[in-house]
Image (cartoon, rainbow, N blue to C red):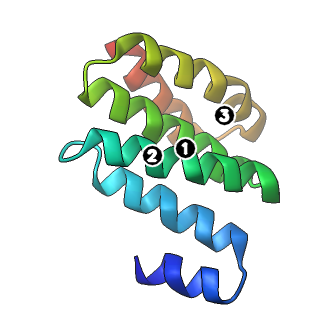
């Protein structure tokens, strides 16, 4: 929360997006609806500042929030949106998360 607030004060949209993604991840299991809302906000900001890494991670976090709330179709949709970004980044950690989540859908 502090990182997000500091980023907002400094108009650092990239840091704000990454802070939102981290906040969303922290709430995946305890409050999936809040997590999904934060992840969606992070996705929008990441697109705005062209931060593909944050966008992909936020989409995967959104998928995890949907899985936690047993919204399987929504989770699969988020992962489908993340897949081309993850592939373009060639990041094995993100591929592993996407693969794990796809296995749950």
Q: Residue at x 72, y 33 (%)?
A: 85
The image quadrant of residue 73 is top left
Q: Residue drawn 39% across and 24% down?
A: 101
Q: Residue at x 36, y 47 (%)?
A: 35
* 55 left or right of 65 in image: right
Q: Dot 3: within a 10 Å radius of its alpha carbon, few (fewer than 14), some, or many (20 or more) residues? A: many
Q: How many angstroms separate mark 3 from mark 1 (CA)?
A: 17 Å
Q: Nearer the viewer, residue 39 or 82?
A: 39
Answer with the quarter of the image where residue 59 lies: top right
Q: Does 73 sit left or right of 41 as displayed? A: left
Horizontally, is 85 left or right of 98 in the view? right
Residue 33 pos. (x, y %): 32, 40
**Is 68 drawn above or below residue 72 in the view shown?**
below
The picture places residue 55, in percent across and down from the top left corner, at 65, 45
Residue at the disc numbered 2: 37
Which label sits on residue 86? Answer: 3
- Mark 2 or mark 3: name the one nearer the start of the chain: 2
Residue occupied by mark 1: 40
Crowding at dot 2, Cα within 10 Å, few <14 / some 14-19 / many 20+, comes out as some
SS of the residue at dot 3?
Answer: helix
Q: Given contact means CB atoms under 8 Å apart, are the residues at marks 2 and 1 in contact?
A: yes
Q: Quadrant of the C terminus?
A: top left
Q: Nearer the viewer, mark 2 or mark 3?
A: 2
Q: Nearer the viewer, mark 3 or mark 1?
A: 1
Q: Which residue is located at x 25 percent, y 27 percent? A: 69
Label ID, residue 17: none
Helix, strand or loop status at disc 2: helix
Q: Classify mark 1: helix, strand or loop.
A: helix
**Disc 3 vs disc 1: Cβ atoms closer than 8 Å?**
no
- For disc 1, the neighbor class at 10 Å (few under 14, some 14 to 19, many from 20) is many
First-in-chain label (3 vs 1): 1
Image quarter where the N terminus lies is: bottom left
């Amino acid at each position: 929360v502090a990182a997000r607030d500091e980023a907002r004060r400094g108009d650092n949209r990239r840091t704000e997006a990454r802070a939102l993604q981290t906040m969303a991840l922290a709430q995946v299991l305890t409050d999936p609806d809040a997590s999904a809302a934060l992840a969606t906000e992070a996705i929008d900001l990441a697109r705005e500042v062209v931060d593909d890494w944050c966008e992909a991670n936020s989409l995967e976090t959104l998928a995890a929030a949907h899985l936690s709330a047993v919204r399987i179709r929504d989770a699969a949709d988020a992962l489908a949106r993340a897949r081309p970004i993850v592939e373009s980044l060639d990041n094995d950690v993100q591929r592993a998360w996407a693969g794990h989540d796809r296995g749950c859908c």
